[in-house]
Every structure is written in structure tokens, then in C-alpha cells.
Image (spheres, rainbow, N blue to C red):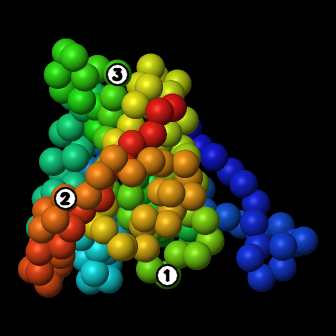
């Protein structure tokens, strides 16, 4: 699945090449893990995003994590979409994890929505999120959940995309510097 939409933020009346979003096969995740996907994860952690890792995150550790994601994709547990910039580089990624319990087969979790710092401010995060949401709905998932660090820039994205706050948990996770931070839980019915 590839979405192609034109945009030129400098000149809205002129078309330009826009990041292309595509669903990655498990083999594509493996192929992109050592470089593009690992670089996205390292950039997020370096930028202060609380995405499960402490700084400094080594590229090899990030690549290993993505290799595990490829295994989950192979088993049908996780779907992965990546955005490719006009030069072919990976500019963003989002994953959708399906609940593994019999009573939770109707729900999924948005996980690791990452946009490279050089690609932010162009609506790419919103497009990646919408892509995962549309796929979830098309494949029978009716409820999505996610969590993010409270007061992070991501909260504006989620609220703007129609997600509802379920609650906040204090000291839920450490940020990349190791400081415990609150986490806000969100949900959306699709």
C-alpha cells in the first residue's frame, strides 16, 4: 500500500514531491533495520522522545530492536509503515500492534510513531497515524490505544487527530535522560 500526495510547504500552489508512505514487509523491515529504521529510532531518542530507550542509543541496539519488529511482522502481530523522502531516505515510521488475547482481538496499539527531526512540521506524523488508523479499521480493529509522555509535542498531534485522553500515570517511564515522567494514555474508536 503506497500513498502518494503532493505538497509544497513553501509554495502551496505548486506541487512538489512528498514523502511516500508504504507498508513494509517483514523482509523490508529487516533490510531497513540496520540503517534507515535504526537512524529514525536513534534520532528520536537523541531528540528527547521517550520511546522505550535511554540515551545514548547505539545504532546496533536500535537495529536489533527493529529486527525483533520484523519477526513480529512475520507472525502477523505488528504492521509497519515507513515514509520515504524524495531522496529515498526514511523520514518516518509507525507500527500497529495487534492485541494478543482472545478477548482483545478487536483492538490494537499504535506504537513507535517516529518522524525524523529534519522532516517535522510537514504533517508527516498525522499522515502516518492516519495510515495506521485506516488499516486498523479496514482489518476489523475497532479500538486503538497508545501512550505518550505527558506534555510532549506528540500530545498535540493525537488530540488534533481525534484521540481521547483515558488518563495519566505519574512516573510511568523514564525519558532518554533517565528521568521518570508521567505518561498519558489515549484511545480512539475507528
Q: Residue 148, percent across and down?
A: 31, 61
Count neighbours of disc 1 (C-alpha within 10 A) and say few if under 14, some if 14 to 19, many if 20 or more.
few
Q: Does dot 2 land on a helix, a strand or a loop? A: strand
Q: Is residue 25 visible?
A: no
Tag of residue 118 = 1
Mark in front: 3 vs 2: 2
Residue ID at (56%, 52%): 161
**Comes first in the chain, label 3 or label 1:** 3
Q: Residue 175, percent across and down?
A: 18, 75
Q: Residue 38, percent across and down?
A: 26, 67
Q: CA distance from mark 3 to mark 2?
A: 24 Å
- Left/right placement of residue 113 relative to residue 127 reads left
**Comes first in the chain, label 2 or label 1:** 1
Q: Are marks 3 and 1 in contact (CB under 8 Å)?
A: no
Residue ID at (77%, 82%): 10
Count neighbours of disc 2 (C-alpha within 10 A) and say few if under 14, some if 14 to 19, many if 20 or more.
few
Residue annotated with mark 2: 169
Residue annotated with mark 3: 106
Residue at the limit of the structure toward the right, as seen here:
13
Compared to 180, does 95 lie above or below? Answer: above
Q: Is residue 20 visible?
A: yes
Q: Residue 2, percent across and down?
A: 59, 44
Query: Residue 41 or 149: which is nearer the viewer?
Result: 149
Q: CA distance from mark 3 to mark 1?
A: 35 Å
Amino acid at each position: 500500500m503506497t500513498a502518494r500526495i503532493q505538497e509544497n510547504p513553501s509554495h502551496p500552489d505548486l506541487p512538489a514531491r512528498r514523502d511516500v508512505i508504504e507498508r513494509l514487509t517483514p523482509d523490508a523491515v529487516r533490510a531497513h533495520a540496520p540503517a534507515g529504521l535504526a537512524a529514525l529510532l536513534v534520532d528520536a531518542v537523541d531528540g528527547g522522545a521517550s520511546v522505550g530507550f535511554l540515551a545514548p542509543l547505539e545504532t546496533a541496539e536500535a537495529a536489533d530492536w527493529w529486527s525483533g519488529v520484523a519477526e513480529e511482522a512475520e507472525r502477523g502481530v505488528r504492521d509497519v509503515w515507513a515514509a520515504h523522502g524524495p531522496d529515498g531516505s526514511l523520514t518516518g515510521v509507525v507500527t500497529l500492534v495487534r492485541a494478543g488475547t482472545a478477548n482483545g482481538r478487536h483492538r490494537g496499539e499504535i506504537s513507535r510513531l517516529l518522524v525524523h527531526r529534519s522532516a517535522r512540521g510537514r504533517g508527516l506524523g498525522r499522515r502516518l497515524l492516519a495510515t495506521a488508523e485506516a488499516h486498523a479499521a479496514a482489518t476489523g480493529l475497532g479500538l486503538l490505544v497508545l501512550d505518550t509522555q505527558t506534555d510532549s509535542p506528540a500530545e498535540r498531534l493525537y488530540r488534533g487527530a481525534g484521540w481521547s485522553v483515558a488518563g495519566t500515570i505519574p512516573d510511568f517511564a523514564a525519558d532518554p535522560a533517565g528521568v521518570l515522567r508521567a505518561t498519558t494514555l489515549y484511545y480512539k474508536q475507528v
